[in-house]
């Protein structure tokens, strides 16, 4: 779906929800078009005053496989620790 939704989920929405999704997507597209036009105009007429990019999207790099594995191991250790504490089996 062009609005950024799962196409299979479309049939589970009521008409009002579909209307909200499409209006939100249209608003997002209008805002991005305005930003692109504004940056184009400023960049053409006053390139030295070009504004910084807005923080609309978090540009953090995706986690690599190693970082994801470390996070999964930490979660498992935390769950095991909490389970042992809940049982009263904390190694004493």
Image (tube, grey):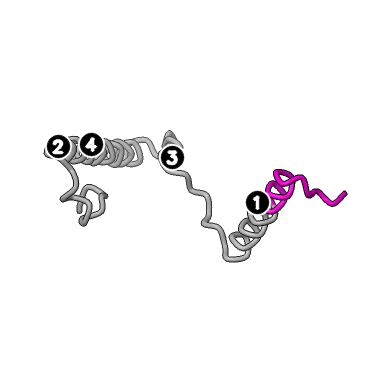
Magenta-highlighted residues:
78-92
Q: CA distance from mark 3 to mark 2?
A: 30 Å
Residue count near mark 4 (Cα–Cα under 10 Å), binned few <14, some 14–19, many ≥20: few
In reply to whether residue 82 is colored magenta, the answer given is yes
Q: CA distance from mark 4 to mark 3?
A: 22 Å
Which residue is rendered at x = 66% and y = 59% of the image?
Answer: 73
Residue 79 numbered mark, or none = 1
Q: In this rendering, which labeled residue sits more in front, label 4 or label 3?
A: 4
Which residue is rendered at x = 43% and y = 40% of the image?
Answer: 53
Residue count near mark 1 (Cα–Cα under 10 Å), binned few <14, some 14–19, many ≥20: few
Residue 42: x percent and y percent?
34, 36
Q: Which residue is mark 3?
A: 53
Quick check: marks 2 and 1 in contact, CB under 8 Å?
no
Residue 82: x percent and y percent?
69, 46
- Lower position in the chain sequence, tag 3 or tag 2: 2
Residue 28: x percent and y percent?
26, 38
Q: Which residue is mark 4?
A: 24
Residue 68 numbered mark, or none = none
Q: In this rendering, which labeled residue sits more in front, label 1 or label 3?
A: 1
Q: In this rendering, which labeled residue sits more in front, label 1 or label 4?
A: 1
- Lower position in the chain sequence, tag 2 or tag 4: 2
Quick check: marks 1 and 3 in contact, CB under 8 Å?
no
Q: Which residue is mark 2?
A: 19
């Amino acid at each position: 779906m062009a609005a950024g939704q799962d196409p299979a989920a479309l049939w589970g929405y009521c008409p009002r929800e579909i209307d909200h999704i499409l209006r939100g997507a249209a608003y997002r597209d209008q805002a991005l078009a305005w930003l692109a036009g504004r940056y184009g105009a400023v960049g053409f007429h006053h390139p030295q005053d070009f504004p910084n990019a807005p923080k609309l999207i978090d540009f953090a790099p995706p986690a690599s496989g190693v970082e994801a594995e470390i996070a999964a191991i930490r979660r498992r250790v935390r769950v095991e620790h909490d389970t042992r504490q809940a049982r009263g089996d904390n190694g004493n």
